[in-house]
Amino acid sequence: MDVRTEMYNMDGSTKDYLPAGRKPLPKMYFTFSVVYLVFLLAWAVVCIKERATVDKIHVAMGALLLFKGLKLVCAAEDLWYVKKTGTPHGWDVAFYVFGFFKGVLLFTVIVLIGTGWSFLKPYLQEREKHVLKIVIPMQVIENIASVVIGETGPTKKDWLTWNQIFLLVDIICCCAVFFPIIWSIRSLREASKTDGKAARNLEKLNLFKQFYLVVVSYLYFTRIVVPAFGRLLNYRYHWCAYAAMEGASFAFYVFVFHNFRPVEKNPYLFVGDEEEEAAAGVLEMEEEAFEL
């Protein structure tokens, strides 16, 4: 026999097919999508204004904002249609497509900024290319696993295996992005001893340290803290975990885009010579202050 079941909550006299803990998500995702698209517009204005210092990495960062905003638009539409009809009407496909490009670009941008590409040097070393060769295919596998997990359930064969693959691949990607940042910090330390540009190297070193700490904090918060937080919440407030995730992501994007924006006097590109003597002394004290 064929059996058809429906699970829904009653919102007055209408059916609401979303779980109680996800009711606010359509509006929340739509609001964040508008914020990111405004962010993209502001980024475009900055790039046009400072076109003389715009590099390829800034174009990649703009593309990241675009796909992040489109992913959130699709997430909002997906959940809105599920709420009203019980099915996403194809918006889930668009969500996974834009999510794929956003995921690949996010880790690629983190790796490229970590290597100093376009900022410190116009090329990638072989070991840095190897990191990208690991991260990009891993992101493809992670997105395939995400689709399988999202479109099936625990009753399906191999669902648990795909969850384990998703977790393993995500951990590998998170670990891989740290190596280029660590290499850049070490190379800046070595350069400070030989090239005589102490103040300039100090600015670069401080910026890379901040970037390293923010990346670690962001990945730790979104991969460990938020899931643990979600498990502690009452089922009616599961949306708070999604809000925390998006809030942390937005804060991370603001930090990265602000510190690596195309400006004429970016710390990478300009430091006054009068700071050399003071910076040389600080660099000597920095040797053991930040161990990786």
Image: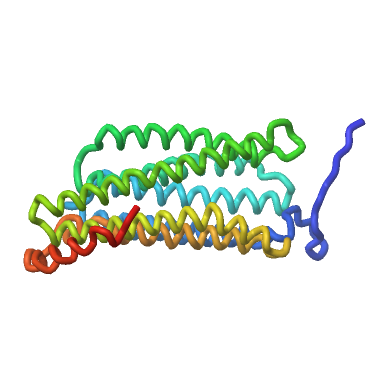
**Which residue is most to the front?**
288
The quarter holding residue 274 reads bottom left
* Left or right of residue 43: residue 54: left
Give the residue at x 24% y 57%: 205
Q: Position of residue 227 (x, y in %)?
A: 60, 55
> Looking at the image, which residue sits at the far right?
1
The x and y percentages for residue 81 are 67, 50
In screen coordinates, is 5 left or right of 163? right
Q: Is residue 280 above or below residue 63?
A: below
| Residue in the picture at 33% in, 60% down | 210
Q: Is residue 48 left or right of residue 234?
A: left
Q: Residue at x 23, y 61 (%)?
A: 286
Name the one closer to the observer, 179 or 99: 179
What scheme was used to colour the molecule? rainbow
Indicate the quadrant where residue 237 lies.
Answer: bottom right
Who is closer to the viewer here, 192 or 53?
192
Question: At 65% from the left edge and 34% from the top edge, which residue is drawn?
Answer: 161
Image location of residue 30, percent across then percent down:
55, 58
Image label count: 0
Q: Where residue 31 sits in the image (x, y, percent)?
A: 53, 62
- Is residue 201 visible in the rendered image? The answer is yes
Considering the image in quadrants, where does the N terminus appear?
top right
Q: Is residue 266 visible?
A: no
Depth check, front residue: 245 or 162:
162
Q: Is residue 119 left or right of residue 19?
A: left
